Image (cartoon, rainbow, N blue to C red):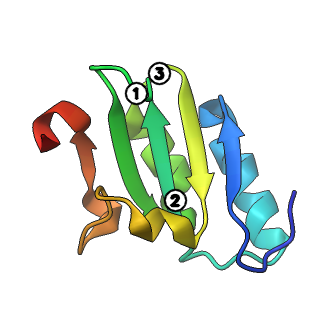
Amino acid sequence: MPQAGGKTVAIYMGLAQAPRITRDLIDAGHADDTPVALIENGTRPDQKVSTGLLADLPRLALQHGSGPTLLIIGTVVRLSRYWGDAPETAAISALAAE
């Protein structure tokens, strides 16, 4: 796993491995409060985005869905329009947001 240090990590099709990914990233030095985003069916009308913190990634993955999903891990997630005041509870549809 990549070492911590302000880098963005992108993992495609990582939902099933979310617990291991979380553990490996924290072991590599990423803070457990690192922002994460899960993007299912990106760019499609049925796109779904969930945001939260690295420590919550396994729970977010279970609640998110089962379609092709891109995991984005890093501070860049804070730049997303999907990042809210309570990221651990944010799970919104791109359609609903428009």
The residue shown at (73%, 69%) is 7
The residue shown at (74%, 60%) is 23
Q: Is 31 on the left or on the right of 79, as rendered?
A: right
Q: CA distance from mark 1 to mark 2?
A: 18 Å
User: Viewer-nearest of labels 1 and 3?
Assistant: 1
User: Viewer-nearest of labels 2 and 3?
Assistant: 2
The residue shown at (47%, 19%) is 67
Q: Is 8 on the left or on the right of 45, as rendered?
A: right
Q: Secondary structure at mark 3?
A: loop
User: Is the C terminus in the top left, top right, bottom left or bottom right quadrant?
Assistant: top left
Instruction: Note whether 71 is above or below 83 in the view shown.
Output: above
User: Viewer-nearest of labels 1 and 2?
Assistant: 1
* Residue where numbered disc 2 is placed: 36
Residue 66 bears which disc, if any? 3
Residue 43 bears which disc, if any? 1
Determine contact: label 2, label 3, CB under 8 Å: no
- Name the N-terminal-most of marks 1 and 3: 1
Instruction: Note whether 88 is above or below 70 in the view shown.
Output: below
- Name the N-terminal-most of marks 1 and 2: 2
